[in-house]
Every structure is written in C-alpha cells, then in structure tokens.
Amino acid sequence: MKRLRTLSTTRLIALALLVAVVAAVLAAVAIAAGRSNGPVPAQKPLAQALHDSITAPAPAGVTARIKFTNNLFPSGALGPVGSALMSGASGRLWATADGRGRLELQSDAGDVQIVWNQQTVTIFDASSNTVYKATLPQHSGSTDTGGALPSISELGTFLSQAREHADVSAARPTDVGGQPAYSVRVSPKHDGGLLGAAELAWAATRPVPLRVGIYAQGASKPVLELAATNVTFGAVPQSDVNVSPPAGAKVTDLGNLAQRSGGKEQHPKTAATGSAALAAAPFSAVAPATLVGLPRQDVRLVGHGDSRALLAVYGHGLGAIVVLEHAASGGGSSGMLGALPTVSLDGVTAHELATQLGTALTWRKGGVSFVLAGSVPPAAAEAAARALG
C-alpha cells in the first residue's frame, strides 16, 4: 500500500485497472462450465457446499470462451478511450495447471492480451499499443506443502464472523453452463457506499468459480461480471499461453504489486501521522478534522522528498472518503485525467470520474493538488470537495 501512495494519479488509475483485471483473470483461471441443461446439486449448508468444492480434485488445464462485462464507466466518461478493458468484450481463456495462462478479449477497438505466470503479468492493449507489466507477489516455500484446507467447522466459524458485517445468503443450488453449481450473494450491512452486492457461483464438484458479479446499490444487472461457457479440460499447449506483445509497443512498468516475502525491496515509509503529519507537510495542507460530517479517521504523510503527500481518510468502511493532497507541479491535467468531464467547485475547475460504484475528483487550488475518491454519488463527492475550501 505504501508503494501505491507514491505513484502518479495516472498510474494509480492504470494500476487499479490492472488489479481489477488480474482479479478477474485469477477467477477465470479455474473456471469450469459444462453444456446447457446440466443437473442441479442437492441443497447443502453454505459451509458444507464450500468445503466439498475446495477439497475436490482440481482440473489439469482449462480452455474456455469467456465474456467480460464492464458497465462501470459511463459512455464517454473517459473521452475517446475504446479499450476492451473499459467497455467489456468477449474472448477466450487458456490456463495451465502450473500457474500460466492467457486471456484474450476481442473488441472493435482492438484486442487485449493478458498473459501471466507465477512471477509476472503483462497486459497488451492494442487500442493504445501499450503494454502494462507488473511483478506478482512471491511466496517462500512450495505451495505443495502449504497449510491444510479449512474444515467445515472452521468455514462455519468464518461465515458466522462475516455475517456480523455482511448479509451472506445460503448456498443456492443452480445450474451454471450445464454444471451443477452453488451460488451465494454477499451484501454489506452498513458503510457499504454504493456497493450493493457481490455474487459468486462455483462448481459443486470442483474447486473452481463459474461466475463473478459485482452489483451497485439498487441494480438488478451487474456492473462488472466475468462469465464462461464452452469450457474444456485437458493439457494446454505451450504456444497458447506463451504469447509476446508486439516489439514496437509502448511499455509501462507498474513494478511489484506487493512486497516479496523476505525480499530486499525498499518501500517508502510513512513520515508522520496525526498532527505531526499536518505540521510536517511541505505545502499548505488542509485535511480538516471532519469532512461533510464524517470524522477524520486517519491522516499521514507518505512518500519522501518532493513527492511527499498527505493522505486522509474520513468515515468508515466502504463508504469512507479518501483525500490525497500534494504540492502542485507545473502544467495542467493531461492524458486520461485531462479527458475526464469537468465540474465547477465554487469557481475551481475539477475533473470528475463518476461510476456506479464511486466517484473520483481531482483539482488544484492554492498551490496544492487534490485527489478525492469514495464510494459515494457525484453530488456527495463534490460537496466534500467544496468543503475542503
């Protein structure tokens, strides 16, 4: 997390997108679905259904047709961006048993190729002729000697604790793509922001997910969804997963997504917290004690040197508002940020990205650059921005 605070806003957006796609890829790696009109499994308690799935034999390899739905960004919100990552697409998946794979998304704007192994992930976006590269977290020791899988009792305890903070449905027997499956719906009880619910369906007899969907409050259709059909199991040729991007593509290196276990990588440390952070900020920091009625839960100075920034969190849970302040540099907004729609904050022009799951604003005032983000509607985000003065 400390590394994220030192990235530019443009790279933060790119990294957030990468993390979302990688999460979708990891879910898709083990996707299993059969043909239509498949059987429905017997009713079971959720802990039992989860246990029976995760302890079942895993497939040796997967080939599938997939559909990625992305309704997060309103049409035109990011200007002329036409990437399949932003608008959704259909495609194919190839995955091996040793942690390698490729996800190909196809759209009129150009294909997106996502290739990964146990060490790295690369995303080639043909619409911008850009390659995004990142190093995945590494773990010491062999995965074959890892801890034992949780028992039914342990899963039941975990679910009981989870239900203190979220509404977790029972396991619903269903048929996903012809496979006997169970599905569960989870929704926050409080402080959930604009998030309505998440749904997951998994195979009843394999430790693999079949569908992942994220819903906004009050929505009947998912904002983000990954689904698969026409799945087959078996060995996957090396040529299907060892694909390199074009030699002339631009490369953006996002670095390590997390610190390696026992590694030597150095991360910027928090310079100060609380009132000491406000006093040490190398610019005229704002960070009030409350913001639109939300108490400040945390404030800290992050980074080092001229890149130091003040990070403040207001409120609790998914409904919290995060504000990042740093000294404004020369020039105006450019690239993706410059293409965002503008709004007026009492005479100050801000760029706004409004989605079904949250809002982000960026603006400059008094030699300070602000980035405000939260799982709140645009009106609430704009009110909070105006309250910062």
Image (spheres, rainbow, N blue to C red):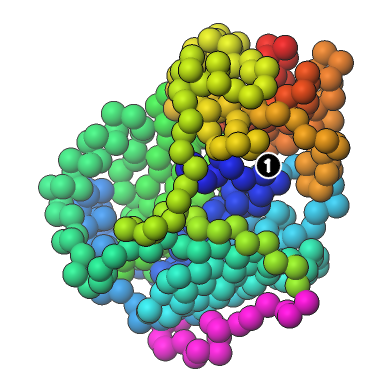
Give percent across and percent down for residue 7.
Answer: 62, 45
Picture residue at 64% right of the left edge, 72% below the top: 113
Mark 1: secondary structure = helix
Q: Nearer the viewer, residue 47 or 285?
A: 285
Q: Is residue 237 magenta?
A: yes
252 in relation to 244, above or below: above
245 in relation to 341, above or below: below
For the magenta stretch, what is the residue range? Answer: 227-248
Query: Quick one: quadrant of the C terminus?
Result: top right
Circle 1 packing at 10 Å, graded few (<14), some (14-19), many (20+), is some
Picture residue at 42% right of the left edge, 31% below the top: 188
From the viewer's perspective, is 379 left or right of 99?
right
Amino acid type, label 1 = Thr
From the viewer's perspective, is 367 left or right of 228?
right
Q: Is residue 18 magenta?
A: no
Quadrant hosting residue 204: bottom left
